[in-house]
Image (cartoon, coloured by chain):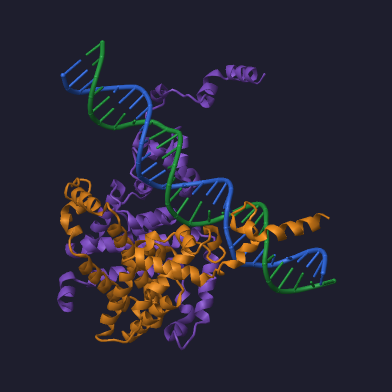
Chain colours: A orange, B purple, C blue, D green
DNA sequence: TGTTCTTGACGAACATGTTCGTTCGCGAAG
DNA sequence: CTTCGCGAACGAACATGTTCGTCAAGAACA
């Protein structure tokens, strides 16, 4: 009897009840929405990154764009880090990492690293995320592969190259993270000015070396310093063997 | 009965009970609390860091410890980054950055950088913060000064040393940020395993260099890789001039 | 067919950093 | 003495990431 009544009731009010936003909304409404997918989420996020920048990509906004709630996204994404890793890999696509190109292997390697750094630099939060996530997407792997190929072309032994690729990528990532943060921060100019002041007015008795070098510490433009740093790294990589290092220090 | 019970109860705990449960708390109560100060906040935060770790230091918990609300802290602190910078500087105290010590200048420099990295490594969030904040506290400046002194002792020209100190600190900070995050993350083992799997099963046609090097990419223990990286950096710093680099590339 | 199990879907709730607006005590000025 | 201005103090509110618990549809099984 109970079941029978219930059956009749729902049958009679089914259509209008649903549309009038009656409190007991049937869950049968659910499948009417287009099914979600991981790729759909990533696609929406990427569109947002390109239109508004990474800071505007939040779980809530993505969910709203997909007509669902933020909690639902966690069925497909582990967390924002997972999402960011996907975004980063997509953003690396334009780089078209390859060992081929013009100029010496060294020129090509530096150009490649510069392009990689550029992507991160343009996305502050991405750079920071790249510091803590071990990217493993196809584009990233292509980047790693290209770097290894270039190091090989430059006669860097495999054993050293295996570690050098980490070193190079870490440095570029860190620099991008540092610089992009400053760029994104409204405090950058004030911070730089405060640092310059601190250095120029430093207590010479306490910090003799800083006092001596003074403004030199802040000299040089970003690209120049970056270029020099890459040269330092490459020079060091070309002349520092792993096992030799180990023995000499033990 | 209810009112009566309440009355009796409050009577028994008159002083503290009134202050805690009475809705119309007079603002005249304010000055009765010990005045806040930036240093008091930092001290509480430091005590928490030492007792429970940085992750447990939140504005709300600090405020609670100081018997106030989190919004009040913003009168004294700009933001959490500001707070973390103070904490970092305090944590650097034990390092006692100095150019003096035993061994070659190189040994001492590496030891100093290792100690610095250790501090960051032990505090994941601190390392990440150090990537985006330009530390300028006294202990940090002492570190910078000591590094400069050691580079000078190692005959690194001032012009190069001025940039090298940045490079060295950035690398160590970045590495600590990377490694400490992994250490703090419950996903570290899974991530590493996934990476190892990805590398060993990589498509050779697509990533020939990665396939060739395989496990070598993940070889070596942290300290060994770090030691080698420092040697790379120092070797590069010792042999890479700034102006020469500029000319050769232009 | 009926029952059980699995999993997508998602609201409520929680923790955290931070901003905005209001109150009130204190010191300066008149 | 009274009034005014400033800034410490702080509650309410907001945005964000994430977890937990519940519901219901579909698959699997008897």
Percent position (x, y) of residue C8? 60, 67
Taking the spot 50% from the left edge, 73% from the top edge, the residue there is: B195
Taking the spot 52% from the left edge, 24% from the top edge, the residue there is: B22
Q: Say left or right for B110 vs B206.
A: left
Percent position (x, y) of residue B201? 53, 82
Taking the spot 31% from the left edge, 48% from the top edge, the residue there is: B139
- Can you tell which quarter of the image residue A116 is in? bottom left
Q: Quadrant of the N terminus of chain B?
A: top right
Q: Say left or right for B6 vs A171.
A: right
- Can you tell which quarter of the image residue A132 is in? bottom left
- Relative to D10, residue A4 above or below: below
- Can you tell which quarter of the image residue A220 is in? bottom left
Taking the spot 29% from the left edge, 57% from the top edge, the residue there is: A182
- Relative to B108, residue B89 above or below: above
Q: Is residue A147 visible?
A: yes
Number of labels in the image equals 0
**Which residue is more in the foreground, A1 or C24?**
A1
- Relative to A37, residue B29 above or below: above
Percent position (x, y) of residue B34? 40, 27
Percent position (x, y) of residue A175? 31, 64
Q: Quadrant of the C terminus of chain B?
A: bottom left
Q: Is residue B104 visible?
A: no
**Which residue is more in the foreground, A224 or C26?**
C26
């Amino acid at each position: 009897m109970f079941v029978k009544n219930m059956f009749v009731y729902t049958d009679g009010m089914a259509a209008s009840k649903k549309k009038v936003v009656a409190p007991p909304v049937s869950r049968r409404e659910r499948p009417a929405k287009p099914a979600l997918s991981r790729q759909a989420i990533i696609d929406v996020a990427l569109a947002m990154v390109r239109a508004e920048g990474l800071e505007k990509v939040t779980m809530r906004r993505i969910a709203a764009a997909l007509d669902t709630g933020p909690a639902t996204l966690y069925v497909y994404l582990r967390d924002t880090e997972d999402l960011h890793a996907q975004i980063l890999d997509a953003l690396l696509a334009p780089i078209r990492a390859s060992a081929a190109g013009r100029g010496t292997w060294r020129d090509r390697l530096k150009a490649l690293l510069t392009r990689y750094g550029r992507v991160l630099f343009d996305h502050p939060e991405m750079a920071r995320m790249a510091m803590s996530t071990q990217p493993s997407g196809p584009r990233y792997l292509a980047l790693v592969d290209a770097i290894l190929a270039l190091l090989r072309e430059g006669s860097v032994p495999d054993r050293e190259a295996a570690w050098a690729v980490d070193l190079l990528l870490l440095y570029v990532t860190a620099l991008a993270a540092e610089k992009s943060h400053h760029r994104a921060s409204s405090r950058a100019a004030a911070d730089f000015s405060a640092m310059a002041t601190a250095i120029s007015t430093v207590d010479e008795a306490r910090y003799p070396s800083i006092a001596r070098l003074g403004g030199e510490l802040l000299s040089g433009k970003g690209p120049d310093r970056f270029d020099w740093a890459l040269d330092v790294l490459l020079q060091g990589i070309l002349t520092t063997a792993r096992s030799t290092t180990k023995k000499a220090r033990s």
